[in-house]
Amino acid sequence: MPDERNFTGGCHCGLVRFECTTDLAMVTACNCAICTKKGLHFTFLSPKSFQLRAGEENLKEYLFNKHAIRHQLCKDCGVDVFARGQKTDGTAVVAVNVSCIDGIELAKLAMTPIDGRNR
């Protein structure tokens, strides 16, 4: 299992910035409507492993389907930076869009297929 590391990241225009700690052991390749249309790849963290450093006032929330995941998009550039939700057991979780992590190359990461289309 990879070691946890500290990462920084943000949206395209730079108004929304975050720090997180993760091992990137699971990065999703989900086939649900929103992940497919937007090309989203998430890693899931405990809220204590995620800190929004800038741009809270520049976030717009987007809900769809069951309204279970609260996607956070930059109002300026439109990038889906992260989302907040709950695991099936009710535990809070933050889903970070891995594409928003500084210096990440998606092609070098192992992806975990998720069948979100049929959930």
Image (cartoon, rainbow, N blue to C red):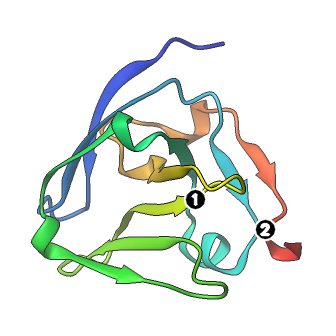
- In the depicted structure, whether residue 100 falls above or below residue 12: above
For this orientation, the residue located farthest to the right is 118
- Quadrant of the rendered image containing residue 49: top left
- Quadrant of the rendered image containing residue 119: bottom right
**Residue at numbered disc 2:** 116
Disc count in the image? 2
Q: Position of residue 22 (x, y in %)?
A: 46, 28
**SS type, badge 1:** strand
Q: Which mark is residue 86?
A: 1
Q: Position of residue 98 (x, y in %)?
A: 47, 47
What residue type is disc 2 on? Gly
* 103 relative to 104 in the view: left or right: left
Residue at figure coordinates x 63%, y 27% from the top left = 25
What residue type is disc 1 on? Gln
Q: CA distance from mark 1 to mark 2?
A: 15 Å
Residue at figure coordinates x 46%, y 17% from the top left = 4
**SS type, badge 2:** helix
| N-term mark: 1 or 2 | 1
41 and 107: which is toward the camera: 41
- In the depicted structure, whether residue 54 falls above or below residue 7: below
Tags 1 and 2 touching, CB below 8 Å: no
